[in-house]
Image (cartoon, rainbow, N blue to C red):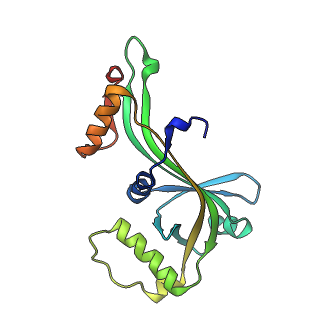
Amino acid sequence: MRRHKKEIIEQNVIDNLLRSATVGRLGTKGKDGYPRIKPLNFACADHALYFHSAKEGEKIDDILRDSRVCFEVDLPIAYVKGSQEDPCNASYLYQSVIIYGKAALVHDKVERRKALSELMRKYQPGGGYGEFLDAKLAITAVVRIDIETMTGKEDLGTGVLRDNVLAGLQAGKPLPMEMQGDEG
């Protein structure tokens, strides 16, 4: 990371971001050598990341060809408005996580059900869903990414701007917040 002062060093902040982010982006290498990025839903458990997919398609083909993947999530925190005097003061405050690891199809039935249960708990935390049907499990791929490296990065501003951002987060303000550039 070029700007180490932006690195998130508290693991709980990274974990919270992974729990709260609803969409992540999977990076694979396509058969033509070009990078591919796919947005998807995901859940984390046991130092791994899980997602489900159709059993066939570009994403699965890429993983079977080269298991090395990258995964990214981000959370836009606040838009800082530019001013008449200096529009270049406009910026976005954020948190993000980038993960590198190896992806593999999960064949173990217990692990597959556990991964799908983690996804349901994340996206439907109130419950109200039943057991996974064998017919659906038969047509669903579950993929595990074994995390090798994980880096968090954030820019929450400085000075008064940072204080206001942190107060807004603490108060549960909807994201992204809108801030004035002169708050810093």
Q: How many numbered circles are shown?
A: 0
| Residue at image point 42% right, 53% down | 17
| Relative depth, front residue between 148 and 181 | 148
Q: Quadrant of the C terminus?
A: top left
Left or right of residue 134, residue 79 in this image: left
Q: Quadrant of the N terminus?
A: top right
Question: Taking 40 as reference, is 171 above or below it?
Answer: above
Residue 36 appearing in the image: yes
| Relative depth, front residue between 138 and 113 | 113
| Residue at image point 31% right, 39% down | 166
Q: Residue furthest right?
A: 32
- Residue 112 placement (x, y as % from top left): 51, 80
Question: Taking 88 as reference, is 140 above or below it?
Answer: below
Residue 56 appearing in the image: no
| Relative depth, front residue between 99 and 92 | 99
Question: Taking 73 as reference, is 46 above or below it?
Answer: below
- Residue 95 placement (x, y as % from top left): 44, 44
Q: Residue furthest bottom?
A: 134
- Residue 149 placement (x, y as % from top left): 60, 56
